[in-house]
Image: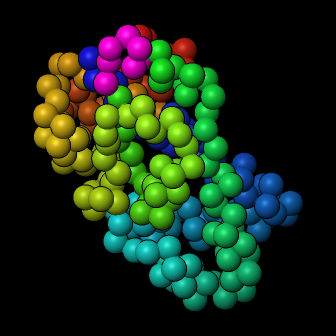
């Protein structure tokens, strides 16, 4: 069996609202930064590998110069938000020891994907994966699922995909990949 995991909120915490609340006690400021960065079209383009972090920072700051110091502070601290989720990580060696393969399939920026691969040793357990930034396509587009299957010569019926977003799970199912909405490590069956 091939276990395919999304990364954000499955293997690595990704909670920008909570992160911003820690950085900025003023909720109004945190809300403005959330809209300016994490809900922007540029954030989507970062995931698609169509913008660099440096260019995105410049766009964010030019669009809202009054928030430039807070934007720079947020972007400088963003890697601190990406922490491993111990309960899920604990399952990975069990999956490998049971003779299964591990893959990741995630929307991720180039700079952040390089960071998480370099700083989280559990990725050494993986047999491969696809980041959206590599192929310029985000989930739930069907082509990102096809890319993973083709790249690693995987058979749909021999896979199980875990993602925390219903839309991504539905898209994988539409491509014939058995999929589960990730609600916590207890939903992963080995």
Q: Is residue 88 magenta?
A: no
* Way the structure is coloured: rainbow
Q: Where residue 109 sits in the image (x, y, percent)?
A: 44, 61
Can residue 142 be seen in the rendering of this structure?
Answer: no
Q: Which quarter shows the C terminus? A: top left
**In the rendered view, does 66 fall on the left or right side of 104?**
right
Is 167 above or below relative to 18? above
Q: 190 or 30, which lies in front?
A: 190
Range of magenta residues: 95-101
Question: Which one is nearer the viewer's eye here, 166 or 119?
Answer: 119
Where residue 155 sits, quadrant-wise, is top left
- 2 w.r.t. 136: above or below: above
In percent of width and height, residue 88 lies at 55, 25
- 186 relative position to 20: left or right: left
Above or below 173: residue 97: above
Instruction: Tell me what residue is drawn at x 72 percent, y 72 percent.
Output: 73
Q: Is residue 103 left or right of residue 80?
A: left
Q: In the rendering, at what x and y percent does residue 1 appear? A: 27, 17
Depth check, front residue: 77 or 39: 77
Q: Quadrant of residue 3?
A: top left
Residue 95 on image: x %, y %: 41, 17
In the image, 153 versus 75, the foreground residue is: 153
């Amino acid at each position: 069996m091939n276990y395919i995991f999304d990364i954000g909120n499955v293997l690595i915490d990704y909670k920008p609202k909570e992160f911003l609340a820690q950085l900025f006690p003023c909720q109004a400021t945190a809300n403005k930064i959330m809209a300016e960065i994490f809900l922007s079209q540029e954030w989507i383009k970062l995931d698609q590998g169509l913008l660099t972090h440096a260019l995105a920072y410049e766009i964010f700051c030019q669009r809202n110069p009054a928030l430039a110091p807070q934007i720079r502070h947020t972007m400088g601290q963003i890697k601190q938000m990406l922490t491993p989720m111990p309960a899920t990580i604990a399952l990975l060696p069990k999956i490998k020891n049971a003779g299964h393969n591990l893959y990741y399939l995630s929307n991720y920026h180039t700079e952040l994907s390089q960071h998480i691969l370099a700083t989280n040793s559990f990725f050494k357990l993986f047999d491969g994966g696809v980041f959206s930034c590599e192929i310029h396509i985000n989930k739930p587009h069907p082509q990102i699922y096809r890319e993973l299957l083709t790249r690693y010569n995987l058979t749909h019926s021999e896979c199980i995909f875990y993602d925390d977003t219903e839309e991504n799970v539905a898209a994988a199912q539409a491509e014939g990949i058995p999929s589960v909405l990730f609600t916590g490590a207890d939903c992963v069956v080995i």
